[in-house]
Image (cartoon, rainbow, N blue to C red):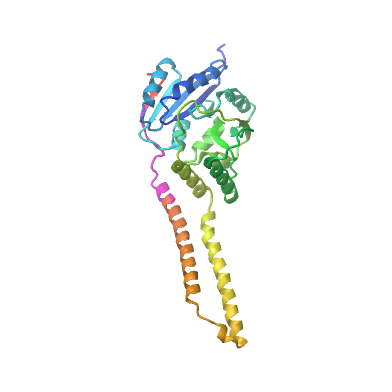
Amino acid sequence: MSPKRKTQVDLVIPIYNEAGVVEQTHVQVRAVVDSLPYDFKFIYVDDGSNDGTVDVLRKIAEGDPRISLLQLSRNFGHQAALTAGLDASRGDLVITMDGDGQHPPAMIPQMIKLIEQGYDIVQAQRIATRDESSISFKKITSNLFYRLINIISGTQVLQGAADFRALSKNALNGLRSMHEYHRFLRGMISWMGYSSVILPYHEPARVGGKSKYSLGKMIRLASDAIFSFSLAPLYIGLSAGLGFFVLAAVQLIYVLTLWLTGHTERIVAGWSSLMGVVLIASGIIMILLGFIGVYVGYIFQEVKRRPIYLITGDKKNGE
């Protein structure tokens, strides 16, 4: 009788310019997973690094045959790199985590157990510690973003959710069926509606270096989330138009009342007020046209059906 096959767990780890960090991160992850009774595979996705990260990953792969290295042709972004790793996964379940050490590997055993208990999604949620009294720009904007997306979107996105999660084979196949170019994986996974459980964690300090998630990248991710999951911006112009229609009706009633009551001397053609109304109305029209332009641009990029990422190198099992 052949021995029972071990459950294969794929770890998808996107990397961008983390040459001084990734080796230590791999050591930390191995310290946890090597003692577990599962067949682990490491899928490192290099997102167009230019600091020698690929060379470090190749060196690590020489000593660990479980490593597969995917090299993207350029920096496509964190969400695209995660997608590349998820597409390459062939395991019974997959866990995605960052390579900077801020997603604690110690949670991996618990995530696997929850998937084995029948959950399709195990979502890690970062919670603040009591000594985190400082308020940073990133924290403020992040909180505002999650409040906004949950108000205007029909899909509720967990505040503090990270791209540190476990997915069953069923959930992974569901995610793979979604081919949109502008990807906000946190929203896409929440939208699927599979059975899920939240796993809170305290975020440790980075192993080294600085975060590569710049303000521009955060704005791009927020834009993808808002315009991909909500039509609310289009309704802003409609609401403003209705508001100006009401104001115009009030003004007309006011003028007619003065004329009917014989107080025509109070009807003064105000050039300034007229210009103010014109400028405000024109501004609203331009804003609305801008929103429409963004949606048309998104549609344009979708219908071209360009790939989400391109791979230039695929180094498997240390070969």
Q: Percent position (x, y) of residue 56?
A: 39, 22
Give the residue displayed 48% in from the left and 47% down from the top: 223
Q: Percent position (x, y) of residue 50?
A: 35, 30
Q: Which quadrant does the N terminus fall into?
A: top right
Is residue 80 something that shows in the picture?
A: yes
Q: Which region is colored magenta?
A: 298-313
Q: Percent position (x, y) of residue 142?
A: 55, 42
Q: Is residue 78 above or below residue 3?
A: below
Closest to the observer, 109 or 104? 104
Q: Quadrant of residue 246?
A: bottom right
**Hey, which residue is sitting farthest bottom in the picture?**
262
Q: Percent position (x, y) of residue 264?
A: 57, 86
Closest to the observer, 318 or 273? 273
Is residue 180 something that shows in the picture?
A: no
Give the residue displayed 45% in from the left and 21% down from the top: 23
Give the residue displayed 40% in from the left and 44% down from the top: 305
Q: Quadrant of residue 258?
A: bottom right
- Does the magenta segment cover residue 306? yes
Q: Which quadrant does the C terminus fall into?
A: top left
Left or right relative to 259: residue 301:
left
